[in-house]
Amino acid sequence: MKQTAAETAMKDRNHGNREPAGTGRSRGHRLPEAVEVNRNLPIQVAALCDTTGKLHPLWFRYADEDNQVRKVEIGSVLSGKTIHYVGLQIEQFICASSIGGRRRTYEIRYSVENHRWYFFRMID
C-alpha cells in the first residue's frame, strides 16, 4: 500500500529516521552569549497566536553546550515576515532581548510544515 506524504512525514518524525534538509541538527551549540552561533539551533518557544493566526513569540529555551537549559525572554519583536526556502514556508522573526546586560538582536524561525522553531542567527 502506498503511503501519503503526511504518513511518511509522521513516520520519519516519530522514528527520527531523517531530518528535513536545512534543519542543521548538531550538538554543541552555544547561544546567545557567544558571537558565533551555528544556524538552525532547535529551540522551544512560547508564543501567542492572535485571532488572525499571527504568531507572537514571547520567550525561548535552548540547551547550551553543557546541556543546561537556558531561557531567553524576547524583549521585542522588531519584524516578522513569511519567507519561502527550498519549498518550505518559514515564519521569520527578528527579535531583541537584553542578554548579559547588553541588548542583542537575533533571528528565530518557525517552520510551518515541520512545526518546529529554530534559532537562526545572532545579528549583533
Image (spheres, rainbow, N blue to C red):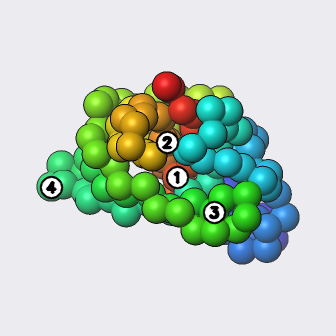
Earlier sequence position, callout 4 versus callout 2: 4
Q: Which mark is residue 55?
A: none
Q: Does label 1 or label 2 sit earlier along the sequence?
A: 2
Please give left or right for residue 30 compared with residue 71 in the image. Answer: right
Residue 87 shows in this picture: no
Which is nearer the N-term, disc 3 or disc 1? Answer: 3
Residue 121 at x, y = what percent? Answer: 57, 33
Q: CA distance from mark 4 to mark 2?
A: 21 Å
Q: Are marks 1 and 2 in contact (CB under 8 Å)?
A: yes
For the residues labelled 4 and 3, the Cα–Cα distance comes to 32 Å
Q: Callout 4: few (<14), some (14-19), or many (20+) C-alpha neighbours within 10 Å? A: few
Name the residue tied to disc 3: 63
Image spot of residue 89 (x, y percent)? 50, 38
The amino acid type found where label 3 is placed reads: Ala
Q: Is residue 51 visible?
A: yes
Q: Which mark is residue 51?
A: 4
* Residue 94 x, y percent position in the rendering: 39, 32
* Secondary element at image label 3: strand
Nearer to us in this view, 7 or 46: 46
Instruction: Say if mark 4 contacts mark 2, CB within 8 Å.
Output: no
Q: Which residue is mark 2?
A: 109
